[in-house]
Image: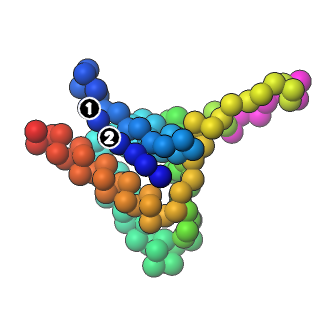
Amino acid sequence: MDYEFRRDPFGGYRARFSMGHEAIGQWLIDEVGKDEEKLDELFSIIDQLSNRTRTEYLLHGGDYSLLLTNEEAEVKANVLNIELDEDLDDLAYYDDEQLAMCGLEDFAQVLGSWRAFIRNEDMG
């Protein structure tokens, strides 16, 4: 999984992720942002999952939800939880940018990189 963090011209943050992982970038921007307390909580949860003192963690956000297990992280747009009318079955439903999964260790590395990025931006 490749990713890049940037500051946009309007003072906001951007997180670009490789195809299949775009939802993680959007989740970082929308649900985490510059909230270091949330990052600290997530690192604590990841430690508990890695040490097997916890088996699962679900964080419901405004636009995205995060599910962490002992082995993987899943970011899913909340809109995907909406039941679609059966008449829409013939329509192509595009959700590639709204669901992403990766290993728990990779996810922890992403969070660490995000933390370093926002700290560096605040200092610069």
In this picture, which residue range is highlighted in magenta? 81-87
The foreground one among 4 and 123 is 4
The single residue placed furthest to the left in the displayed view is: 124
The single residue placed furthest to the top in the displayed view is: 10
Crowding near pointer 2: few (<14 within 10 Å), some, many (20+)?
A: some
Give the label on residue 5, or none. 2
The foreground one among 55 and 103 is 103
Q: Residue 122 appears in which quarter of the rendering?
A: top left
Residue at horizontal 44 percent and vertical 58 percent from the top = 107
The foreground one among 108 and 16 is 16
Residue at horizontal 10 percent and vertical 39 percent from the top = 124
Q: Look at the numbered disc 2 and give the secondary structure of its residue.
A: strand
Tell me: residue 110, above or below residue 71.
above
Tell me: residue 4, above or below residue 109.
above
Q: Look at the numbered disc 1 and give the secondary structure of its residue.
A: strand
Q: Amino acid at mark 2?
A: Phe
Q: Amino acid at mark 1?
A: Arg
How many numbered tags mark residues here? 2
Q: Label 1 vs label 2: CA separation?
A: 7 Å
* Residue 123 appearing in the image: yes
For disc 1, the marked residue is 7
Q: Is residue 61 one of those drawn in magenta?
A: no
Give the percent coordinates (x, y) of residue 17.
45, 42
Give the percent coordinates (x, y) of residue 55.
56, 71
Q: Could you tell whether 63 is left or right of 113 in the image?
A: right
Give the percent coordinates (x, y) of residue 77.
58, 38
Q: Is residue 83 one of those drawn in magenta?
A: yes
Q: Residue 65 appears in which quarter of the rendering?
A: top right
